[in-house]
Image (cartoon, rainbow, N blue to C red):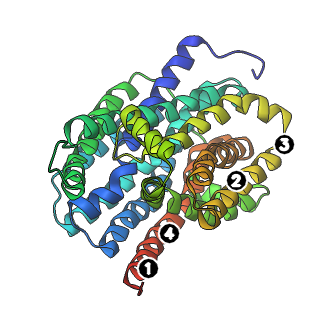
Amino acid sequence: MNGSSVTPYVRTRLSFMMFLQYAIWGAWLPILYPFLMGHRGFSLDQTGMCLMAGAVGALAGPFIAGQLADRSFATEKLLAVSHLIGAVLVYFLTTAADFNTFLVLSFLYGLVYAPTLALTNSISFANLPNRDRDFAPVRLWGTIGWIAAGIFVGQVLYRFHTPSGEGVTPDAIAAAQNAGRVVAFQVSAVLGVIMAVYCLTLPHTPPAKSAKERTAWLEALGEVRKQPLVTLFLIAVPISMIHQFYFVFTAGFVSEIQNAANSENANAFAKTVNEVLGVGGGGLMTIGQMTEIAVLALMPFLALTFSRKTLLLTGIAAYALRMALFAYAPELPFVLMGVALHGLCFGCFIFVAFMIVDSQASPLTHSAWHSSRMRPSCRSSSWASRCTACASAASSSSPS
């Protein structure tokens, strides 16, 4: 079976599934932090709590969804229900003006959305003859969806929520863009409904039928004693914390450095980026997704040429180098290099980790293992969100 080829029809169907899956997320995640701080008026502590709530909700969600997908429901139907509920929740986020309501909705959204990331992988693995060769080109379209949604939201902000003309102050521009960021959640809700309907047309991926006396997640916990799964599980915790710090603060960090650059060419480049990619969605962070596309496109070759251990170490080294560049070389050229390293960070660690899980876990617990691998990721993301808010508050309150 590994020598057979996936049909163009199945590849196209799975690719569009990935496109929608990550467009739903990419529409709002890059703008969440400035939306809460700049438009809702939440404090740093409240913003960190909202970011943490989504991760806490994702702690239970993957295990529950993994159990259902492995034992009770066809994966594509579980995906449809999850995305429909998620679309409703993300739409209500547009009307949640107070902290407590937004906090609860964030928790619920994390509960239903986080499992879908692993379930889409499970559907792909179940319908691809050779995971090492075929999965990367399919998953590539998830990154394309993320970029497309981010650019669309950025263009809406740039063209309809960025006032211009004489007398328009920077504060007025920022306020208009912050208010306009609500469109990101609306776009995500529409995409969620489309995804829910589309999931019902995906290839049927039935649940496993055997060993009903034991739950899939308990079996997955039993398998964690095996190598390399236990090592991978433990490494995912600090890496996920670093990942969360990156997505929370990089957009503002890069923007401040770029705006402060004295180079005329740098300013012209920043203007060009805004005109092409829009504003408000992370701007130059899109370079990271573009390099991610390049790495994923090369993954079939890389997976056959290098060992998975080598690829994982490359990803970890890229995480360390990126943060070192941000910390010790905060000039625009070096920061851009750090953003570009996102491709290696994601492709060589997170993507390869999913491949290792699928090849090492038993077929009965694939969905539960994909989800349980995300569990430490979500927990460490919640810690990182809280630490980020605390660190920012301490920094802003320290004497200059």
Q: Which residue is mark 3?
A: 307
Dot 1: element: helix
Q: Which mark is residue 384?
A: 4
Q: Amino acid at mark 4?
A: Ala
Sequence-wise first label, 1 or 4: 4
Residue at image position (64%, 47%) is: 341
- Against 77, is 307 above or below? below
The residue that disc 2 covers is 318
Image position, residue 119 (x, y; %): 50, 40
Pick whichever, 142 or 209, lies toward us.
142
- Among numbered discs 3 and 2, the one appearing first in the sequence: 3
Q: Residue 68 in the image: x percent, y percent? A: 46, 46
Q: Quadrant of residue 240?
A: bottom right
Figure quadrant of the C terminus: bottom left
Picture quadrant where residue 283 is located: top left
Q: Any mark on residue 104, and which? A: none
From the top left corner, tell me how far across and down residue 182 is, in percent: 22, 47
Q: Position of residue 269 (x, y in %)?
A: 47, 40
- Mark linked to residue 395: 1
For numbered disc 2, what is the local secondary structure? helix
Between discs 3 and 4, the one toward the N terminus: 3
Which image quadrant for residue 148? top left
